[in-house]
Image (cartoon, rainbow, N blue to C red):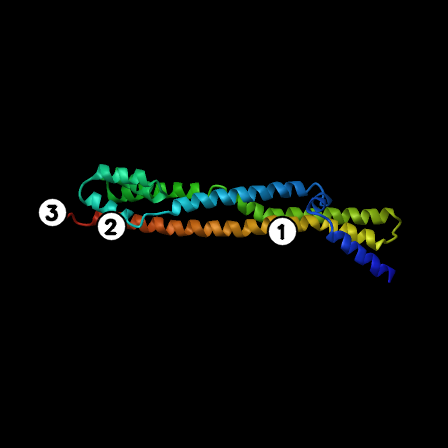
Amino acid sequence: MITLLQDVAAVESAKTMGFGELFLAGGWLMWPLLLLGGVVIFIFVERFIAIRKASKIDPNFMNRLRDLICDGKIDAALRLCKKTDTPIARMMEKGITRLGRPMGDIQTSIENVANLEVSRLENGLPILATIASGAPMLGFLGTVLGMVKAFMQMSQAGGVVDMSALSGGMYVAMITTVAGLIVGIPAHFGYNYLVARIEKLIFQMEASTISFMDILNQPVEKK
């Protein structure tokens, strides 16, 4: 009965611990995890805004570009691309500047710009993926170190098992694992979400490239 009351008291004490107390109880590894959490938030928000901006495509852009090229208004087509300021527009701009060269050279120049744009959009994602896998491992390291410390204290006590002290040391040690998962899980889902958005944009870039090459290959109507 006394042991049960002690366990209940320990649980009630744990429930009343604030976030700051739990953070400090987790040890020094909580600070790197806190830093990693801030990095995750920064990268996700910054990349989300950049990808959303790059994905805003005027549905009439390619039609307007086709009309200008077919009418021979190359300078106007270039101005339209520069004004649009999207990855697809920059790809089309590069292709227009290569007009008069072989079709293979034009397509290669467009693909090179596309690769640079995709690389720019993926900036920071490897860090996000690393945190997604590394943060839980760092948290688990803190738990292992805490468990080692708890058992060393028990060994120094002459092998006398104090369940209240042991259980207290164990839950404190597992705080870092919880913190690692709190950082790692959002990083994992955030990374996959951003990758999916980039892949969707890549598909649109490929479709626009095909449309542009079709414009160049279509016969010119004589007026």
Q: How far apart are the two marked residues, 1 and 2, measured between alpha carbons?
A: 50 Å
Residue 60 place in picture, x, y as percent: 28, 49
Q: How far apart are the two marked residues, 2 and 3, measured between alpha carbons?
A: 18 Å
Does the residue at mark 3 contact the one at mark 1 (Cβ under 8 Å)? Answer: no
State left or right for residue 4 relative to residue 179.
right
The quarter holding residue 121 reads top left
Mark 2 vs mark 3: in front? 3
Say which residue label 2 marks. Answer: 214
Residue 104 visible (yes or no): yes
Choose between 149 and 81: the one closer to the eye: 81
Say which residue label 3 marks. Answer: 222
Residue 139 place in picture, x, y as percent: 66, 48
Type of amino acid at the residue the image marks with label 3: Lys
Residue drawn where x is 39% and y is 47% of the image: 55
Residue drawn where x is 83% and y is 61% of the image: 4
Residue drawn where x is 61% and y is 47% of the image: 135
Residue 63 place in picture, x, y as percent: 25, 49
Say which residue label 1 marks. Answer: 181
Type of amino acid at the residue the image marks with label 1: Leu
Helix, strand or loop at mark 1: helix
Does the residue at mark 2 contact the one at mark 3 (Cβ under 8 Å)? Answer: no
Say which label, 1 or 2, has the lower sequence index: 1
Say which label, 2 or 3, has the lower sequence index: 2
Quadrant where the N terminus is found in the figure = bottom right
Type of amino acid at the residue the image marks with label 2: Asp
